[in-house]
Image: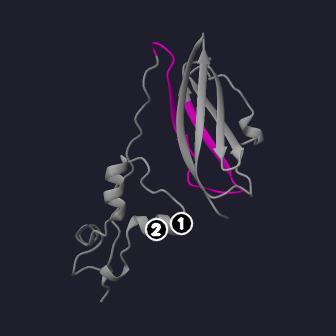
């Protein structure tokens, strides 16, 4: 009979081997507790009972919530970024700000700011406030977690938002 205890590893172990940061959106203290634990009881409750073979129970994906209504001042929110992404592939970042805002993006790698063609665009947000960039992650990019800075400017006001994405090997 399958003994799931023999196959459990902490998320920290998976992260070390893969170069990914699995629960990066959690507060650091909670992330550390969750990622370092091997929770046998939870795995047994979620994945199988003693009388059934292992079955993965999946929760339905949450319904996306609309972003904030942008009515006063200059606001900026990063909606999505491709992460993790393998080097050599195309990443995309989408943000929302005030309509007409002039926007820039900078992706920082180990070697410094990226000069990828798709990042050189400085678009204005569309009538709904959305702006998007797509760029190729170079084949020589060092795998790891890299910061991204997005800036929006409109009528003398500036907003900056930071995020990060994870680049993996081929």
Q: Seen from this angle, which residue lies furthest front? A: 111
Residue 83 drawn in magenta: yes
Marks 2 and 1: in contact by CB < 8 Å?
A: yes
Circle 2 SS class: helix
Q: Which residues are magenta?
A: 71-95
Q: CA distance from mark 1 to mark 2?
A: 6 Å
Q: Nearer the viewer, residue 134 or 108?
A: 108
Q: Is residue 134 above or below residue 56?
A: above
Total numbered labels placed on residues in the image: 2
Q: Residue at x 51, y 17 (%)?
A: 74
Instruction: Give the quarter of the image for residue 168.
Output: bottom right
Q: Is residue 4 above or below residue 110?
A: below
* Spot occupied by residue 24 in the image (x, y as percentages of width and height): 44, 50
Circle 1 SS class: helix
Residue 24 drawn in magenta: no
* Spot occupied by residue 105 in the image (x, y as percentages of width and height): 65, 33
Tell me the residue that label 1 is attached to: 18
Q: Seen from this angle, which residue lies furthest bottom? A: 1
* Spot occupied by residue 137 in the image (x, y as percentages of width and height): 70, 51
> Badge 1, how many Cα within 10 Å: few under 14, some, many 20+?
some
* Spot occupied by residue 103 in the image (x, y as percentages of width and height): 64, 25
Q: Residue at x 30, y 84 (%)?
A: 3
Q: Residue at x 74, y 53 (%)?
A: 138
Q: Residue at x 65, y 63 (%)?
A: 169
Q: Nearer the viewer, residue 51 or 74?
A: 74
Q: Seen from this angle, which residue lies furthest top? A: 155
Q: Which mark is residue 167?
A: none
Q: Is residue 4 left or right of residue 163?
A: left
Tell me the residue that label 2 is attached to: 14
Q: Nearer the viewer, residue 82 or 36?
A: 36
Q: Is residue 168 left or right of residue 119?
A: left
Q: Is the C terminus in the top left, top right, bottom left or bottom right quadrant? A: bottom right
């Amino acid at each position: 009979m399958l003994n799931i205890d023999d196959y459990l590893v902490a998320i920290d172990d998976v992260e070390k081997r893969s170069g990914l940061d699995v629960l990066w959106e959690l507060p650091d203290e909670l992330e550390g507790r969750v990622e370092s634990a091997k929770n046998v009881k939870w795995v047994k409750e979620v994945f199988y009972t003693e009388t059934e073979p292992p079955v993965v129970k999946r929760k339905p994906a949450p319904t996306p919530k609309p972003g904030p209504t942008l009515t006063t001042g200059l606001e900026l929110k990063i909606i999505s970024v491709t992460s993790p992404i393998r080097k050599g592939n195309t990443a995309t970042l989408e943000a929302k700000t005030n309509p007409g805002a002039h926007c820039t993006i900078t992706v920082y790698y180990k070697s410094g700011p990226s000069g990828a063609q798709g990042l050189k665009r400085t678009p204005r947000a569309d009538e709904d406030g959305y702006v998007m960039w797509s760029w190729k992650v170079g084949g020589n990019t060092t795998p790891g977690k890299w910061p991204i800075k997005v800036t929006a400017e409109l009528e003398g006001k500036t907003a900056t938002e930071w995020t990060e994405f994870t680049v993996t090997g081929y």
